[in-house]
Image: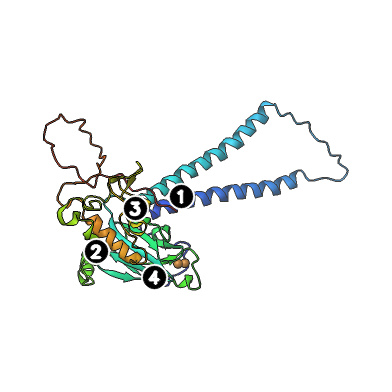
């Protein structure tokens, strides 16, 4: 909650990962505190115990570095820190992996950072600034980019943050576990008003959230807005696929999102957000096999917000007719094994059977 409260060491824990992060943090604090105190105590204790007494001659005992007890001592003081640091490593990596792999069933929300505000777009069409409304107990995935410099989307109560970079898409996900309002901070210094680049996450019950979504923007869903932009920019003149699910002068877009695309140079790439963005702004950089360098750049003609709408539109084209027809074969792995020639395929291959999203760049 945002109201001022009595002194607290930790922000509220309001996401599914928060407990894990806090436990890990507590473990590291306890280990560090234990060894700090132990070492401080031994420094004082030995300084007292072996202090120089008047009239005493200092005698240095010969040191045998091959003695069994010496070896044992060295093994112990190596093995214990090694074990402890390995526990920290494995535990930390497991939390990092969890945080960097959004579950497939996540609600998709788009975030654009800009000096000095957060612009949020919901797939259903609602848009907000410095506010993020989400349902409780649902996995939420943010796909984020920046219009200018590096920002960082940080929700302390969710114990998660990720850099928001110009020209790239990064992701962040969480599952809020408590209805309430929580702070959003920008956690990367981004100019004069960096400290003012703040906002609020409002976690609502599923029914309240649906009601809130229903109030909408009146501009239609993101995909619909993307479609309007698609028509306005004349994309359909060449990408005829949208009309007849066939290749035009330019590749078929139906079923493209999430599939693997073969390029002219023999490379294979995954058609994700970054690929689509690059293909719109820098069409020459990745030419699809079987096509010519025909498309002009749309750099300067489309904003980052518009790009997200376009991506959402192209994403919505997957599975449109239940079948993918594409000049580029999709290497979708099935466990069926080779099918006898002439037999009828059991079912159309789903387009969404793509590899899990790559971990976000940090
Ligand atoms: Cu944006 Cu700091």
Residue 180 placement: quadrant: bottom left
Secondary structure under tag 4 reads loop
Could you tell me residue 240's position as x and y percent? Answer: 19, 56
Which residue is painted at 86% across and 46% down in the image?
54
- Residue 2: mark in rendering: 4
* Above or below, comparing residue 311 to residue 271 in the picture: below
CB-based contact (under 8 Å), mark 1 and mark 2: no
Secondary structure under tag 1 reads helix
Which residue is painted at 48% across and 42% down in the image?
87
Give the labeled residue for mark 1.
Answer: 24
Q: Sequence order check: which comes first, mark 2 or mark 3?
A: 2
Nearer mark to the viewer, of 1 and 3: 3
Nearer mark to the viewer, of 1 and 2: 2
Could you tell me residue 302's position as x and y percent? Answer: 33, 66
Q: Sequence order check: which comes first, mark 4 or mark 3?
A: 4
Does mark 1's beta carbon lie closer than 8 Å to ligand 1? Answer: no
- The mark total stands at 4
In space, the residues marked 4 and 2 are separated at their CA atoms by 47 Å
Residue 296 placement: quadrant: bottom left
Give the labeled residue for mark 2.
Answer: 234
Query: Crowdedness of circle 4 by 10 Å Cα count: few (<14), some, many (20+)?
Result: few
Going by the image, does 205 lie left or right of 149?
left
Q: Sequence order check: which comes first, mark 4 or mark 2?
A: 4
Res 16 seen here: no
Give the labeled residue for mark 3.
Answer: 275
Query: Crowdedness of circle 3 by 10 Å Cα count: few (<14), some, many (20+)?
Result: some
Secondary structure under tag 3 reads helix
User: In the depicted view, which residue is nearer to us: 60 or 233?
Assistant: 233
Q: Sequence order check: which comes first, mark 1 or mark 3?
A: 1
């Amino acid at each position: 909650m945002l109201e001022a409260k009595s002194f607290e060491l930790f922000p509220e824990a309001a996401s599914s990962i928060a407990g894990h992060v806090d436990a890990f943090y507590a473990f590291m604090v306890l280990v560090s505190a234990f060894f700090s105190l132990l070492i401080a105590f031994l420094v004082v204790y030995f300084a007292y115990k072996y202090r120089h007494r008047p009239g005493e001659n200092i005698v240095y005992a010969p040191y045998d570095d091959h003695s069994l007890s010496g070896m044992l001592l060295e093994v112990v003081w190596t093995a214990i820190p090694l074990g402890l640091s390995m526990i920290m490593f494995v535990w930390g990596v497991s939390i990092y992996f969890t945080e960097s792999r959004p579950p497939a069933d996540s609600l998709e929300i788009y975030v654009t950072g800009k000096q000095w505000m957060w612009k949020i777009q919901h797939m259903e069409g609602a848009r907000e600034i410095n506010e993020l409304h989400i349902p409780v107990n649902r996995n939420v995935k943010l796909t984020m980019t920046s219009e200018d410099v590096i920002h960082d989307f940080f929700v302390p109560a969710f114990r998660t943050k990720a850099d928001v970079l110009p020209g790239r898409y990064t992701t962040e996900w969480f599952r809020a576990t408590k209805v309430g309002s929580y702070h959003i901070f920008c956690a990367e210094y981004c100019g004069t008003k960096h400290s003012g680049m703040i906002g609020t996450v409002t976690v609502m019950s599923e029914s309240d959230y649906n009601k809130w979504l229903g109030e909408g923007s009146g501009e239609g869903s993101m995909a619909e807005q993307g479609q309007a932009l698609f028509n306005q920019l004349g994309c359909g003149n060449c990408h005829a696929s949208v009309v007849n699910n066939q290749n035009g002068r330019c590749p078929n877009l139906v079923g493209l999102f999430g599939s693997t695309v073969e390029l002219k140079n023999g490379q294979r790439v995954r058609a994700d957000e970054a690929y689509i963005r690059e293909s719109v702004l820098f069409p020459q950089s990745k030419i699809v096999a079987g096509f010519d360098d025909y498309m002009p750049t749309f750099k300067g003609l489309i904003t980052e917000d518009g790009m997200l709408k376009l991506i959402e539109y192209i994403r919505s084209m997957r599975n449109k007719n239940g079948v993918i027809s594409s000049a580029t074969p999709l290497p979708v792995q099935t466990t069926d094994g080779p099918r006898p020639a002439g037999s009828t395929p059991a079912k159309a291959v789903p387009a969404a059977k793509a590899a899990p999203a790559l971990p976000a760049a940090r």
